[in-house]
Image (spheres, rainbow, N blue to C red):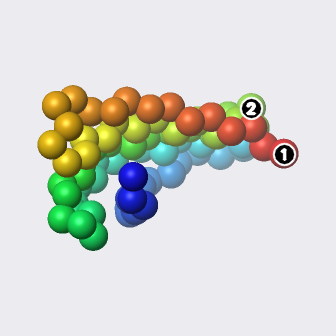
Amino acid sequence: MPQINVSDVKVSGSDGTYTLATTEFSGTTDSGRAVSGTIEGSYADEVLTIRFNLQYGAMPMPMICTFSAPKK
């Protein structure tokens, strides 16, 4: 899986609680494969959670993934 950069993700919030607005992205990898999807997330209670749906190449359905990381 190649690196995918998502730009213009809006972040809002204050006092240690933040939201990453749902952001759609699309493009082409260096090898010419189409890539698209959405990304969203939050930071609360010192845990960053990112959720994304990724449609890569000719996959018949998107990968739906969640990533969580505590602050160290």
**In the figure, is residue 2 to the left or right of 26?**
right
Give the quarter of the image for residue 70.
top right
Q: CA distance from mark 2 to mark 1?
A: 12 Å
Point out the residue furthest to the right here.
Answer: 72
Residue 52 in picture, x, y percent from top left: 40, 38
**Front residue of this view, candidates 50 and 21:** 50
Q: How far from the left and from the top, in percent, is residue 36? A: 24, 48
Q: Is residue 31 above or below residue 65?
A: below
- Label 1, secondary structure: give it: loop
The residue positioned 34% from the left and 33% from the top of the image is 63
Residue at the spot 16% in from the left edge and 31% down from the top edge:
60
Relative depth, front residue between 38 and 28? 28
Mark 1 sits on what residue? 72
**Could you tell me the amino acid type at mark 1?**
Lys
Residue 5 sits above or below residue 59 on the image: below
Residue 16 relative to residue 6: left or right: right
* Residue type pointed to by label 2: Asp
Labels 2 and 1: the sequence-earlier one: 2
> Could you tell whether 16 is left or right of 53 in the image?
right
Q: Is residue 17 visible?
A: no
Viewer can see residue 58: yes
Q: Which residue is mark 2?
A: 45
Q: Residues within 10 Å of mark 2 (few under 14, many from 20)?
A: few
- In the figure, residue 61 lies in which quadrant? top left
